[in-house]
Image (cartoon, rainbow, N blue to C red):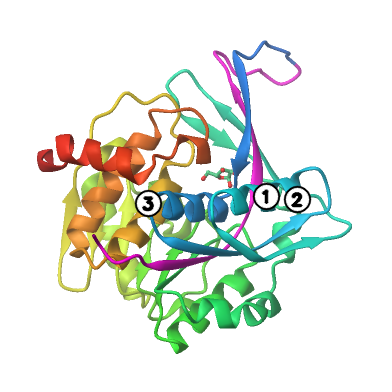
Amino acid sequence: MPRQPFIAVVGSANVDLTTFYDSFPKLGETVFGKRFDLGFGGKGANQAVAARLCGANVAIVAKVGNDLFGPATIKNFQSLGIDASCVRIADGVSSGVAPIFVDPNGENRIIVVKGANDLLAPQDVDAAAPLLRRAQAIVLQFEIPLRTVYYAARFAKSNGIRCIVNPAPAQPVDFEQLRGVDYFIPNESEAETITGMPVHTAGDAKDCARYLLEQSVRRVIITRGERGCVWASNEDTELLPSFEVQSVDTTGAGDAFIGSFAVFLGEALPEKDALRRASLYAALSTTKVGTQKSFWARAEFEKEWQKLGSRL
Ligand code: RIB
């Protein structure tokens, strides 16, 4: 049995309102959608849930609104066995919500309304410090104020805790504030927005990853959906392929990748093995509809790994 890591997420929690459509309405047009799904989401929450389903002990530091969704979000964490003692309810603001539109190929467009996520402050990191100090990894995304992300990254560094930053949604980054971060993991479009470099081909992704490394982070992984990912350190870059699956909804696949990667690394697997496993975990999540509800339990994942793992 691998050791059970403790992963802490400082990040967002949303409720996802997902509409599946055949044709997207033009301005002023009304069309019928195919199907609707309501579920728990938010990049931080999704990564916490993926880590938990992969078998880690998990805690999340987050803020939700005092509305229908806030208490339900906390209950969802608790029912999954995620420590939500540092999730606070904020008055006078909505919970984070995300209207999501999924096209017939399973590709998505997302509008995030941050709501209470925008109130997660460095003081909340301080308040959670005793919990965070016990973590093997702190996982961060960009759906909360960046000053909180930077503060938590510095907290991780000064406490010798592995720090994984997922810069999503993409925003201009002050890399000085992320100096020494262990993993910086954007997808292609985020990498493009952050650097201003084109990231279409594997070669582009490698160039972009090298540029990002020069900005002071220790490792860069650029995820490329069904085209795998590019891993880069100061010594080397490598293109890792992805697993072929029948995708129905890619929403949350990046979160599945990051949450599971944190766990596999925390189990002390060699880095490339952890990456390959995270790639399969992410690919499998696209075979089901929704975000958190599309993530696989560890036992089910292991069965697939036994069948497919050797193919990569
Ligand atoms: O990465 C997918 C997530 O992005 C969704 O769950 C949505 O809430 C947005 O945060």
Secondary structure beneath label 3: loop
Left or right of 98 on screen, residue 149: left
The residue pinned by badge 1 equals 75
The residue pinned by badge 2 equals 71
The residue pinned by badge 3 equals 54
Q: Measuring 40% from the left and 60% from the top, which residue is drawn there?
A: 56
Identify the image quadrant of the C terminus.
Answer: top left
- The residues tagged by marks 2 and 1 sit, at their Cα atoms, a distance apart of 6 Å
Taking the view exactly as shown, the residue that stands out farthest to the bottom is 158
Asked whether the viewer can see residue 180, the reply is: yes
Which badge, 3 or 2, comes first in the chain's sequence?
A: 3
Taking the view exactly as shown, the residue that stands out farthest to the left is 310
Tell me the kind of residue under disc 1. Lys
Which span is picked out in magenta? 1-28
Which badge, 1 or 3, comes first in the chain's sequence?
A: 3
Identify the image quadrant of the N terminus.
Answer: bottom left
> Where on the picture, by quarter, is residue 241?
top left
Task: Judge whether 108 appears above or below 224 on screen.
Answer: above
Q: How crowded is mark 3: few (under 14 residues within 10 Å), some or many (20 or more)?
A: many
Tell me the kind of residue under disc 2. Pro
Q: Does the residue labelled 3 lie within 8 Å of ligand 1?
A: no
Residue 200: horizontal and vertical position, in percent?
31, 43
- The residues tagged by marks 1 and 3 sit, at their Cα atoms, a distance apart of 20 Å
- The residues tagged by marks 3 and 2 sit, at their Cα atoms, a distance apart of 24 Å
Asked whether the viewer can see residue 204, the reply is: no
